Amino acid sequence: MAGTSNIAKNGDVVMDAVRAADHDRYLSALYAPADRRDMLLALYAFNAEIAGVRDRIHEPLPGEVRLQWWRDVIATDGPEETGHPIADALKAAIVGNHLPKSAFDNMLEARIFDLYDDPMPSRTDLEGYCGETAAALIQLAAMALDPVVAPRFAELAGRAGCAQAITGLLLLLPLHRRRGQCFVPADILAAAGTTPEEFVKGEGGAGAERAVAAMIALAREHLSAFEKGAPALPVALRPAFLPLALTRAYLDKMEKAGGSPLGSTTTLSTLRRHWLLLRHAMRGWTPL
């Protein structure tokens, strides 16, 4: 009961944090049952916190210290409060839903990559990164919604997470290039005829466009695999996967004339996002 009260006590702060940092996941959480919504928001607020470490702490080593702080908080048993509303809400969500701490540890380990400018080595490494971050988050959200049914859909969460994360990296591509980061795998860049150094500097030319097209194709590959299995998702788990309702629309817009994510961030109108989320919340991924 103490965990539930901690979530409720910090609910407004957590909700505001997700609404500001991750509006798509915030909107999707609104479709969860009222007694599960705060649990999802605690997970999403934690994700926003660790994904944004580099934005707030610009040096890698202090960033690693911050990630270690989160690791220590999660590892600590007991009802002691940290004084950090998101951390206290997350601890309550973990205890209240018996969520595996190892998943959070893996997520924090993966986020160390964000702090440095090392290029992503390969497609396999990229998919592993997506699996430990976005896919793990979807699976944890599913466990918070229905811990009995969720394990049956872990593989689908993997596909969903890869589709969502690769699309998200494409949406953030202009920001990453300004920072000197390259999440496009080196093997994809080499096949496209460019290098991570050229890609980051904007010197990749047609090779950069080919690399982006390959990333879009990779996201679509995972999205198609997810959509093939998505009709089997029970209604109880649907909110955990609901952010995928927007992924195809983002990818479609990237492929339109002048929509390359190399130059600008792809956006969807508020009305379009609300409509897609509502449609999938009501119907799932069944054909219209």
Image (cartoon, grey):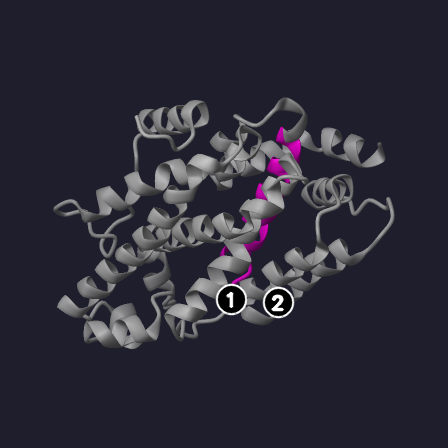
Which quarter of the picture shows residue 272?
top left
Residue 104 percent across, percent down from the top left: 65, 56
**Where does the magenta region start and end?**
37-58
Q: Residue at x 37, y 42 (%)?
A: 227
Number of the label disc, if any, that sits on residue 180: none
Sequence-first disc among 2 and 1 = 2
Main secondary structure along the magenta-highlighted residues: helix
| Residue 39 colored in magenta in the image | yes
Number of the label disc, if any, that sits on residue 115: 1
Q: Residue at x 38, y 24 (%)?
A: 279
106 shown above or below 231: below
Please state which of residues 152 and 51 is positioned toward the viewer in this rendering.
152
| Residue 127 colored in magenta in the image | no
Q: Which residue is mark 2?
A: 64
Residue 76 percent across, percent down from the top left: 81, 55
Amino acid carrying label 1: it is Leu
Residue 7 percent across, percent down from the top left: 73, 34
Q: Report crowding for label 1: few under 14, some 14 to 19, many 20 or more residues within 10 A (C-alpha).
A: many
Which quarter of the picture shows residue 12?
top right
Q: Quadrant of the N terminus?
A: top right
Please state which of residues 105 and 80 is positioned toward the viewer in this rendering.
105
Amino acid carrying label 2: it is Glu
270 shown above or below 259: above
Cα distance, mark 2 to mark 1?
8 Å
